[in-house]
Image: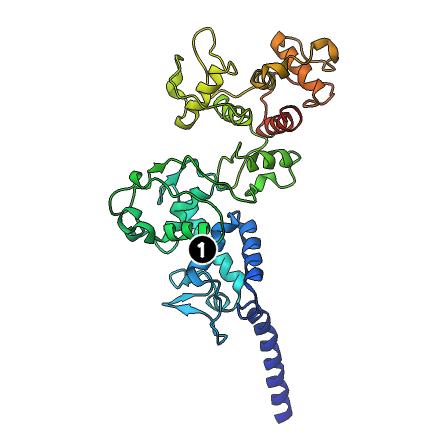
């Protein structure tokens, strides 16, 4: 009986050592800062957070310490590990928070995302909340350790938590980032959830664009991501791009104006439905109008919320080209293979012929001119134009 007890005890010790060993192997006493940053980058990619945001947050909270110099879990004022997870977050496994650095980083990322997703209901917004724009994470960072008034920069200045994070991003990670205009905030206290602060005029994009979940394995992913990197397109939500959805006239004008690098014009148009244009799109609409890319109809309507057909999209793209380029081809230089162009305008024929010659379009039996162009199709056309025609 005594031998059996010894065997059971030995087995228990062996099992515990197997369980504990992988967790302690993730400790900062065993990992270099470079190895820790690699783990942070992996989590950031999984969670769709710009890596530099998560790195700076981890450094601010613990200077990358998961363990003390003596090998004990790093706990400060009841906060645990590299991301200093507070005990108020009871749904996390407390033991794993102590010993598993990746789990701790994932927990911190989830807390930050909780603040991000609450934008507009609990926290204010910055611009259109494109997660690729670093400055858009301002209020999510503010609320990481609690939505508290002391983080109002009008009260605490550069000592506000999110301002210190931004300074770390500049100093430690050599990444420029612009603080929001604090004049939009109250002099003290917390701003209202309904507040929308404009994106700073000088803003910065994540080094590796956030991959929206509906782009995984999508055939036009490379074109969409290419325009992400150039800051020409953004998603429609926190994790969606909707590549197969149609696009409105006001949305398309932004892509064209940015893609063709046109100077923004601020002026009110003499269009009956001008007031229906969303605020952020008005300068883009005005710029497209002044460059004859977009026009009103005979009754004076611009229809900003209307979806764009494939024919209309190609005409607008053709009109956006520099004149010396758009005159390079005549319709006779390449036969149009499509069998469904009945009713297409002369401008449509000209645009289709041009983009066939330039390999923006492919030879297929049908063109479907009256179908709505999708967001993904437009991104492909714009990307190929920028790479093959404008360069």
Q: Residue at x 59, y 37 (%)?
A: 225
Looking at the image, residue 284 sits to the left or right of residue 21; the answer is: left
Q: Residue at x 46, y 45 (%)?
A: 176
Where residue 227 appears, x then y in whole percent?
57, 33
- Name the residue located 38 percent from the left edge and 46 percent from the top edge: 139
Q: Where's residue 28, x and y in %?
A: 53, 67
Residue matched to label 1: 57
**Above or below: residue 211 compared with residue 301:** below
Residue 149 appears in the picture as rendered: yes
Q: Does residue 184 appear to the left or right of 239 in the view shown? A: left
Q: Is residue 164 left or right of residue 263?
A: left
Q: Quadrant of the N terminus?
A: bottom right
Residue 40: quarter of image: bottom right
The answer to whether 81 is drawn above or below residue 42 in the figure is: below
Q: Position of residue 65 (x, y in %)?
A: 48, 66
User: How many labels sit on residues?
Assistant: 1
């Amino acid at each position: 009986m005594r031998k059996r007890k010894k065997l059971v005890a030995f087995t228990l010790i062996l099992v515990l050592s197997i369980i504990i060993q992988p967790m302690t192997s993730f400790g900062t006493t065993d990992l270099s800062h470079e190895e820790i940053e690699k783990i942070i980058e992996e989590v950031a990619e999984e969670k769709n957070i710009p890596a530099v945001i998560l790195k700076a947050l981890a450094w601010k909270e613990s200077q990358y310490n998961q363990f003390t110099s003596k090998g004990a879990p790093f706990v400060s004022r009841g906060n645990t590990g590299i991301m200093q997870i507070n005990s108020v977050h009871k749904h996390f496994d407390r033991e794993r928070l102590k010993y598993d650095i990746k789990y701790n980083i994932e927990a911190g990322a989830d807390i930050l995302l909780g603040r991000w997703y609450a934008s507009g209901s609990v926290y204010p917004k910055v611009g259109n909340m494109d997660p690729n724009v670093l400055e858009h994470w301002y209020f999510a960072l503010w609320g990481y350790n609690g939505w508290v008034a002391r983080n109002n920069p009008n009260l605490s200045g550069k000592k506000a938590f999110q301002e210190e994070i931004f300074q770390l991003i500049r100093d430690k990670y050599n990444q420029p980032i612009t603080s929001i205009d604090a004049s939009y905030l109250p002099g003290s206290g917390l701003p209202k959830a309904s507040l929308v602060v404009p994106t700073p005029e000088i803003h910065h994009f994540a080094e590796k664009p956030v991959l929206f979940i509906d782009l995984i394995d999508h055939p036009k992913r490379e074109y969409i991501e290419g325009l992400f990197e150039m800051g020409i397109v953004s998603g429609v939500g926190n994790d969606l791009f909707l590549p197969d959805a149609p696009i409105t006239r006001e949305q398309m004008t932004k892509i064209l104006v940015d893609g063709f690098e046109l100077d923004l014009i601020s002026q009110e148009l003499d269009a009956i439905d001008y007031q229906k244009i969303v605020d952020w799109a008005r300068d883009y609409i005005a710029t497209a109008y002044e460059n004859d890319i977009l026009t009103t109809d005979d009754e004076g309507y611009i229809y900003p919320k209307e979806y764009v057909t494939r024919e209309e999209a190609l005409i607008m793209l053709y009109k956006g080209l520099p004149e010396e380029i758009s005159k390079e081809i005549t319709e006779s230089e390449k036969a149009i293979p499509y069998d469904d162009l009945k009713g297409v305008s002369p401008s449509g024929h000209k645009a289709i012929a041009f983009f066939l010659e330039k390999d923006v379009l492919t030879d297929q039996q049908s063109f479907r001119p009256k179908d709505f162009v999708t967001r993904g199709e437009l991104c492909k056309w714009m990307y190929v134009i920028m790479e093959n025609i404008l360069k």
